[in-house]
Image (tube, grey):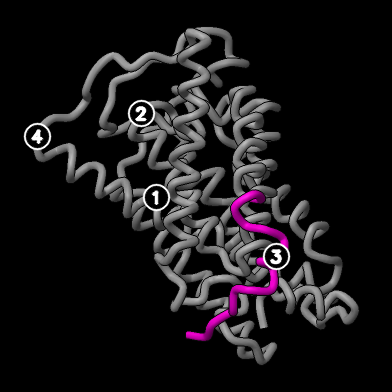
């Protein structure tokens, strides 16, 4: 049975966890928001200067620990609810397969398309290389691992157990709006975030829920998250206010904030919601609605 069909079957019969939210997941959700407001992306000193610099090592290990803790909590709740871990969206046998790589290409293509449009509107310009020699390979690999951890944690925390449990009681798309709102809340505390950026994050969350709905798992969403974030470091633009560090290209953002996103980066640009809509159209054309019933939720 697929994740999507399981959710549909359960919509008529709310599960116990919907009536009494598991304490473990609530605690971890609070920890996720704490990380966003005062952890990796929100050190107090960095906030004073309105800039945040994060290394791949620092980001990677914090996100990896958070992901591991969330997996432990989900395993415990799965035992309580007599469900397999794979039912919550991350079947290990489907890891790093077609859905993941297609999502990665979509993610990198999305940020590239946004910056191309920005370039044509004279808001973005590449000025040269920031790295040379072996530093290019080591830095790009390090950021790849770090953003893989980010994708795993954020996708599983927002669209794993919580999405599954809410959907079993109120339906998939109402639950998707709730989890996307929580996803945006985690970004709303970023320094200098604006309304456009918050709307873009909500749309980002809904797009990733669309990936989940059509594929039956979170691997496409994880790949998209990785490709999008890695692309921002590749081009040397801010990522949710994070200052580029060991990025491949030197680049500049010039122009009004509605176009460039300012210090927040492309996330807060008016071009981003437009790009996400285009990605949704491309994805729905590639993954037809009847694919809802095709993918199997494989076990560990």
Per the model, the C-alpha gap separating discs 1 and 2 is 15 Å
4 or 1: tag closer to the N-terminus: 4
Q: Position of residue 217 (x, y in %)?
A: 58, 68
Q: Does the magenta stretch include residue 283?
A: no
Per the model, the C-alpha gap separating discs 3 and 1 is 22 Å
Eye-nearest disc, 3 or 2: 2
Report which residue position mark 3 lands on: 163
Which element is circle 3 on? Answer: helix
Report which residue position mark 2 lands on: 235
Q: In this view, does 119 lie to the left or right of 236?
A: right
Per the model, the C-alpha gap separating discs 4 and 3 is 44 Å
3 or 2: tag closer to the N-terminus: 3
Q: In the rendered view, tell whether residue 143 sits above or below residue 154.
A: above
Numbered circle sitting on residue 147: 1
Per the model, the C-alpha gap separating discs 3 and 2 is 32 Å
Per the model, the C-alpha gap separating discs 4 and 1 is 22 Å
**Residue at screen point 59% across, 52% down:** 286
4 or 3: tag closer to the N-terminus: 4
Q: Position of residue 18 (x, y in %)?
A: 81, 74
Highlighted range, magenta: 284-300
Give the residue at the far left of this rendering: 133
């Amino acid at each position: 049975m697929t994740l999507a069909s399981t959710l549909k079957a359960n919509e008529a019969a709310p599960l116990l966890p919907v009536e009494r939210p598991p304490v473990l997941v609530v605690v971890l959700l609070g920890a996720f928001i704490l990380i966003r407001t005062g952890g990796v992306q929100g050190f107090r000193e960095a906030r004073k200067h309105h800039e945040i610099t994060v290394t791949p090592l620092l980001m990677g290990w914090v996100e990896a620990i958070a992901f591991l803790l969330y997996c432990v909590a989900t395993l415990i709740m799965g035992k309580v609810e007599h469900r397999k871990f794979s039912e919550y969206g991350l079947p290990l046998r489907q890891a790093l397969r077609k859905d993941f790589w297609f999502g990665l290409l979509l993610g990198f293509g999305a940020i590239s398309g946004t910056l191309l449009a920005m370039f044509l509107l004279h808001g973005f310009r590449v000025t040269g290389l920031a790295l040379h020699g072996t530093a290019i390979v080591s830095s790009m690999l390090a950021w790849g691992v770090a953003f893989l951890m980010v994708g795993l944690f954020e996708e599983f925390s927002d669209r794993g157990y919580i999405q599954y449990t809410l959907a079993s009681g109120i339906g998939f798309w109402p639950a998707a709006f709730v989890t996307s709102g929580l996803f945006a809340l985690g970004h709303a505390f970023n320094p200098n975030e604006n309304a456009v950026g918050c709307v873009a994050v909500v749309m980002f969350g809904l797009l990733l829920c669309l990936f989940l709905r059509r594929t039956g798992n979170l691997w496409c969403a994880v790949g998209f998250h990785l490709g999008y974030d890695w692309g921002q470091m590749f081009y040397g633009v801010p990522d949710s206010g994070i200052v580029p560090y060991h990025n491949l290209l030197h680049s500049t953002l010039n122009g009004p904030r509605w176009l460039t996103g300012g210090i927040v980066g492309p996330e807060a640009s008016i071009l981003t919601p437009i790009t996400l809509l285009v990605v949704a159209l491309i994805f729905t054309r590639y993954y037809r609605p009847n694919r809802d019933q095709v993918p199997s939720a494989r076990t560990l």
